[in-house]
Structure formats: structure tokens, C-alpha cells
Amino acid sequence: MSLYLVPKSLLYVEAVADHGSIQAAARAIRIAASAIDRQIKLIEARLGTQLFDRQTTGMTLTSAGEMFVLMARRWQEDETQLLSEVRQMQGVDFGHVRLVAMDSLVNGLVPQFLKSVAQDYPRVRVDVDVATPDGAAEMLERGDCDMALCFNLRPGRDLHVLWSAELPLYCVVAPDHPLAVQSQVTLQDVRPYAIAVQSRALAIRRMLEARHSWMFENGPPPVVTNSLQLLKQLVVSGDHVALTSEMDAAPELLSGQMQAIPVVGTNIAAQSIALAVNARQSLPRIASILAGNLATQSGEMLDRLRARRL
């Protein structure tokens, strides 16, 4: 449902930007091409600048046009939030919640959370963005999301942590890997094997480099990736090992596709996981409810992972 608070001219500019031409936009939003063209030319005349570069292959946004599209999308988000809050005042479970999470969580905890939302709050829309920990913190601080579930969240005075847990370092391996019989390992035990490691965009890689740089200088060349999904697939295949946390590999550990071996030794630092919101912003009621549900489910997932070792 729309309240139609966003000016049509902004929607027309956004539609042309999305579809690449006035004709394609007209077909998509079912508005006459002449009406769209007229509105865009009227804006350009008033501004004294073009919103689009017009080429034979289509229309692309100018810098001014990009500002208009950004304004249109922000206005639509404000409209959705206003409608959500009004509905909640009326006692209706309706709304729009924006979550940012880590790549490694999108095949375990996040789908579980979304399933529960669909069952309990079928009229609530949840948008999920995948980001690095640093990117998640920046999105939260800018107000681009309602909550962030991420590893190694850097402290910030504008961030309020709803739930957090410490995550010891593990070596994850396939069940038939030679290391799988070990009850614990050192980094020296791990290095002779092919390792899949995180890129420097992730804090765990930076931590390992700062404390154990020799890991990346000796032994078989590591596979480096910013995709935790790829890293886990390499481990499941049996060809590689990885250094990470239980929560990174939760579904694979619970299904038996992987085993997690504690890493011991000097200077081995734990990671952390946290669910946080922006302390400067008041969350809509439904977002607060879902944040509480996600915190509970995160804690339950960690309890299940640790119970399997008892």
C-alpha cells in the first residue's frame, strides 16, 4: 500500500533510471511515455541542468539525476515508515524492517529468522543487506538500516548493543580431514595444510596478520576470499581448512558437514558477534520486537552449537 506522498516526478525519474529509457519506464509503471518525458524536461528546465545523459543506447543518470533518485528512495522509505508507525498505533502488525548481516549467516541464522517473521508477522517486510563488519557499522551509523548482526563490531558511541557473545577461534575441517581426529590444534599444526582465508575486508584476517603474520608466508599458498560461503564450500569439499568462529559455520557444523577444533596457543584472540541498533534513532515498534526475536534466536543458535560438544 502506498500513501502517494512521493511526488510523481521523483518516481518518474527513478523509473527511467531503473529501466534505462522513457519507453521502458512507461511500460513498467504504466504511465504514458509523453507524461514521463514532460515531467523530466520540466524539472531540467527549472534546474537549468540535465538529469540524464541521452544516448542512442539509452539514458543514464547525471550527477544531478543521482541526487534526485537518492531523494526519491529516501522519501519512499519515510513513507513506508510513517505508514508502519500509524498501523502499529492502530494495533496492526505491519511494517518495514531493515537488517544488515554477514555473508556467513545467510545460509543459517538469517533464513531461520526470516521464516519466523513470515510465520508470525506476515505483513512485515524485511530487507536484508549483506556487508562486511565495517560496512555494517557504517550503515547503522548513517541510519541506512534498523539493526546489524555482525562479527567484531567496532565500538561506537552511537551504537547500542542488544546482544553479544564472545567467539573463540576454531579450525573448521571436513569430517574426513586428517586434523578432524584432533581435540585441539595450534596454528603450527594447521599451516601445513591448504588454508582458505578471509580477505582483509574482514577483521579476523587483519587480526591473524597482526599477531601471526608467518601464517601467510610459509606453507601452501592460501585461497583468499571475501565470501564466507565460498570459504565454507572449500572446507566442506575436504581440500581446505579455515580459521573462523562457530557462528560462521553454524549450519555446516550442526549438519555434520564440518567439525570445529579449538585453536590453542599464545596470543590467540577471540572474536565477537553482536546485534546492535543506532542509539540516536527510535526504532518503530515492530523493528524493536523483531530485534528482540533475532537476539533470542542468535543466542539459541550459539547454545545449540556449544551443546553439540557436550
Image (cartoon, grey):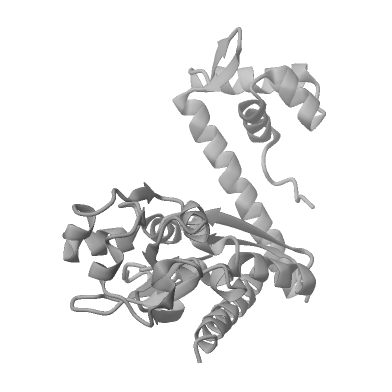
- Residue 246 visible? The answer is no
Numbered label tally: 0
Q: Residue furthest bottom?
A: 310
- Where residue 93 sits, quadrant-wise, is bottom right
Which residue is nearer to you in this view: 75 or 19?
A: 19
The residue under the point 59% across, 43% down is 73
- In this rendered view, identify the residue nearer to me: 128 or 309: 309
Residue 88 pos. (x, y %): 72, 72
Q: Residue at x 18, y 59 (%)?
A: 213
At a point 52% along the width and 60% down the height, the residue shown is 236
In the rendered image, the vertical position of residue 285 relative to residue 72, given as above or below: below
Which corner quadrant of the image does residue 11 belong to? top right
x, y (%) of residue 94?
75, 66
Residue 160: % across, % down: 42, 75
| Residue 180 drawn above or below residue 128 | below
| Residue 260 seen | yes
Q: Position of residue 2 (x, y in %)?
A: 76, 50
- Judge from the rendering whether residue 10 lies leftward or rightward of residue 213; answer left or right: right
At 63% across and 32% down in the image, what residue appears?
14
